[in-house]
Image (cartoon, rainbow, N blue to C red):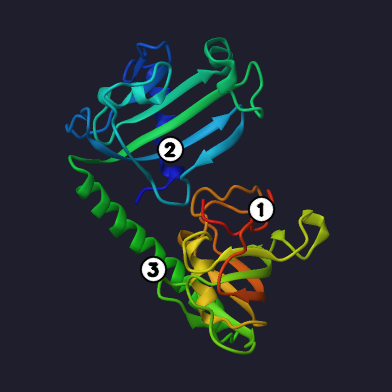
């Protein structure tokens, strides 16, 4: 799998080639400027195809989203493209092609002011760096490719965590999907079952050691046990599975591969895309059923499923 670093080098080389007439400079029907850097493949992208893409989106000089160091994104080529949008590009591209595309925020403001995120400002320029690395004719083929790539990635993250635990001589149990649970206090009673309504105290730490959220630290402004129904997918998978290894009053550290957490969309600047995470948790309460009106979750980066 090629990294975005390689992709950006290819695209930078493509920009240099534009002045030599070896790369195309065009505008989409919706008026979006783009530079096409052609690859060597001949497979044309068509409406309805499923494509695998590495891309980076920048606002001015800041990276807003990237697949750098992580997995590509998969999407279907729509029959009707949105004007002034990257969806206009797909059917003009082939497998292996790369594109640099730009959008001016003022154009979006003029067309639909309500659709512009608050963080964006008038005069901002959005730049996309794209490379098509796969084309599939069916959803099943794209899904099989995704599952295979995702498994390879997860296997690598599991090995990283296993080495970390071995180096620090930490004993931990492995969940079915690949998180690791270090029991700090076993608690009492029965293990938590799927469907139980539980509340937990937790602190989330990035693999680089930064605390990104906690409901026991007033700095994060939501002190108090966090309630949810265990084993129902309401939380990130790596966290949710670990609950089945705990008892009422139990405490543990959970080591979670990024693929079982937030993957490439962490939602917090304190978490890098595709960064493994560590949660320290305490089971505060366990009930058979949720109250009629459970307390609403806070607005922080809690370990909920996104």
* Any part of residue 207 in sight: no
The structure residue drawn at horizontal position 41% and vertical position 71%, both measured from the top left corner, is: 177
The quadrant in which residue 169 appears is bottom right
**Count of residue discs:** 3
Do the CB atoms of the residues marked 3 and 1 lie less than 8 Å apart? Answer: no
Nearest to the observer: residue 45 or residue 97 = 45
Among the two numbered marks 3 and 1 on one chain, the one whose residue lies closer to the N terminus? 3
* Any part of residue 22 in sight: yes
The structure residue drawn at horizontal position 65% and vertical position 16%, both measured from the top left corner, is: 122
The quadrant in which residue 89 appears is top left
Q: Which residue is mark 2?
A: 55
Mark 1 Cα shell of 10 Å, populated few (<14), some (14-19), many (≥20): few
Q: Position of residue 257 (x, y in %)?
A: 49, 65
Position of 166 relative to 40 (above/below):
below
Nearest to the observer: residue 19 or residue 277 = 277
Secondary-structure class at tag 3: helix
The structure residue drawn at horizontal position 51% and vertical position 26%, both measured from the top left corner, is: 127
User: Which label belongs to residue 155?
Assistant: 3
Which-is-in-front pick, marks 2 and 1?
A: 1
Measure how far apart labels 3 and 1 are at the Cα level: 35 Å
Measure how far apart labels 2 and 1 are at the Cα level: 35 Å
Q: Position of residue 140 (x, y in %)?
A: 21, 49
The structure residue drawn at horizontal position 47% and vertical position 29%, both measured from the top left corner, is: 128
């Amino acid at each position: 799998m090629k990294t975005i670093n390689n992709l950006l080098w290819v695209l930078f080389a493509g920009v240099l080639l534009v002045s030599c007439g070896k790369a195309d400079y065009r505008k989409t029907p919706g008026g979006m400027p783009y530079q096409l850097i052609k690859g060597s493949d001949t497979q044309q992208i068509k409406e309805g195809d499923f494509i695998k893409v590495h891309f980076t989106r920048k606002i001015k000089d800041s990276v807003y989203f990237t697949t750098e160091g992580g997995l590509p994104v998969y999407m279907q080529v729509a029959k009707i493209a949105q004007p002034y949008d990257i969806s206009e590009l797909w059917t003009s591209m082939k497998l292996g092609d790369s594109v640099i595309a730009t959008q001016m925020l003022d154009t979006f403001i003029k067309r639909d002011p309500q659709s512009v995120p608050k963080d964006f400002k008038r005069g901002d320029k959005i730049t996309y760096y794209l490379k098509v690395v796969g084309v599939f004719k069916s959803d099943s083929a794209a899904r099989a490719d995704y599952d295979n790539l995702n498994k390879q990635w997860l296997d690598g993250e599991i090995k990283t965590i296993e080495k970390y635990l071995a180096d620090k001589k930490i004993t931990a149990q492995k969940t079915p999907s690949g998180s690791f649970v270090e029991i700090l206090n076993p608690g009492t009673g029965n293990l938590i079952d799927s469907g139980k309504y539980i509340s937990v105290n937790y602190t989330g730490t990035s693999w680089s050691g930064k605390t990104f959220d906690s409901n026991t630290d007033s700095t994060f402004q939501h002190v108090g046990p966090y309630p949810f129904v265990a084993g129902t997918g309401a939380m990130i998978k790596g966290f949710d599975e670990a609950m089945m290894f705990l008892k009422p009053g139990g405490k543990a550290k959970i080591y979670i591969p990024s693929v079982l957490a937030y993957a490439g969309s962490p939602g917090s600047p304190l978490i890098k895309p595709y960064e493994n995470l560590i949660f320290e948790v305490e089971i505060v309460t366990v009930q058979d059923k949720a109250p009629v009106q459970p307390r609403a979750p806070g607005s922080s980066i809690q370990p909920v499923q996104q």
